[in-house]
Amino acid sequence: MDKTLRIEAIKQAMDKAGLNQAALSAKLSVSKEIVSKWLSGVKFPRPDKLLRLSSALELNYDELVEIISQVNEPIIAFRKKGSTKTTEKHINRAKNIGRLLSCLVSYLPFDEFVQPSKLKNPKLEYEYVQSFTFKVRKEIGLRIDQVIDFTDLIHTFHELQAVIVPVMWGKKNVHENALHIYLPDSMTTWVYLNLDTELHDFKFWMAHELGHVFSPDLRGNEAEDFADAFAGALLFPQELAKQAYKSISSSKSDKIRISKIRDYALEYSISLISVYKEINNYAIYNSLPKIDLGNSLFGANTNFNKMFATVSGSLFENESPNAEDYIQRTSDVFETPFFDTLKKYLVEHGKSASYVQSILDTPLIDAKELYAELT
């Protein structure tokens, strides 16, 4: 058993008292940094600070502190990006979101008797991943050379009873581009997708998260590596990589090689990096020489991304949407029951905007706008 602060109750009490984090820290004679760590779940207050916090917000111990069990704790997976490290702060914040999501489970429009399918024994082996993604493509109804569309991925999420949570977290180069939360006790999966990301990267992240949905028993780097391998193979399968390798390896210059990779990226709506990695994965598996383009490919990929709007830019025509447009548009496009489910819970339980703020990890001003639209 362990203890955690009831973040939602604290934020609601702060809002009621007209206190922001700076004002609360001054009232408690502690630093703003320590209050921030309390509210993100990184730190738990010492007994004397907990007593002062209780007094300042007029919350008793049970209203302030939740006793949690480690048995059915939320399982977290972050979209790994480069050398970015997963910190305790990342994990604790995501687990707090997971605990809040558990309140919504009974409101989901899913079959309560049927457990979503998952892989029996997921492996990172090249042939295994290729065989499984071929099976997934076949179930979607696509030939090996056909482009996987965003709607194909969305429909697959829906069939697997995975809830997409579309968020606008700004352009980030860390984990928050995608967040996967699995709740073992209800066997429900929640996938947060940041819409403020490049279009072609976004498709890879969606496929990556789908890999997690199929393999909920994997953990840590093993889970991330499998999801990466699954995404690459699903979007650019072995037969395409074979064809691309033959064409690109015979080219006379790196400029021509990059140009050909760019053509494949355009045709299959994925990044140059994804095409490049799958070509070399094919080469390694078949004991062929790798294609080495050094840093020049990454520069070309950056320029390639500049040609396109972000996902949010495409959805909202580069405008900042109001709450109504954001909820309606994302619910329709991603076929997600999230906002309808959230609305039912908020109305039935009389929750405040602080619950929306905590569950979406969004600024309070945005949470209030969403709350007003939902209630």
Image (cartoon, rainbow, N blue to C red):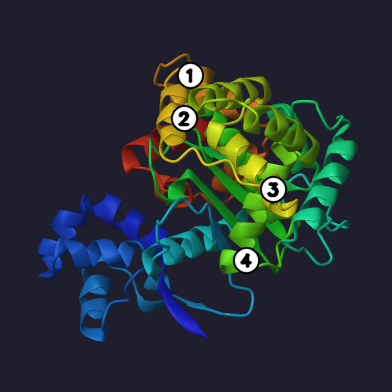
Task: Give the x, y percent position of residue 176.
Answer: 44, 48
Task: Indicate the amino acid at tag 1.
Answer: Phe
Describe the element under mark 4 as helix, strand or loop.
helix
- Closer mark to the observer between disc 4 and disc 3: 3
Left/right of residue 26 with respect to residue 370 in the rendered view: left
Dot 4 crowding, Cα within 10 Å, few <14, some 14–19, many 20+: few
Who comes first in sequence, dot 2 or dot 1? 2
- Residue 169 can be seen, yes or no: yes
Who comes first in sequence, dot 2 or dot 4? 4
Disc marking residue 260:
none
Dot 3 crowding, Cα within 10 Å, few <14, some 14–19, many 20+: few
Q: Write down the residue under mark 3.
A: 288
Who comes first in sequence, dot 1 or dot 4? 4
Rendering quarter of residue 146: top right
Front one among 209 and 258: 258
Dot 2 crowding, Cα within 10 Å, few <14, some 14–19, many 20+: some
Disc marking residue 222:
4
Q: CA distance from mark 2 to mark 1?
A: 12 Å
- Residue 328 can be seen, yes or no: no
Task: Indicate the amino acid at tag 4.
Answer: Glu
Q: Write down the residue under mark 1.
A: 308
Task: Indicate the amino acid at tag 3.
Answer: Leu
Who comes first in sequence, dot 4 or dot 3? 4
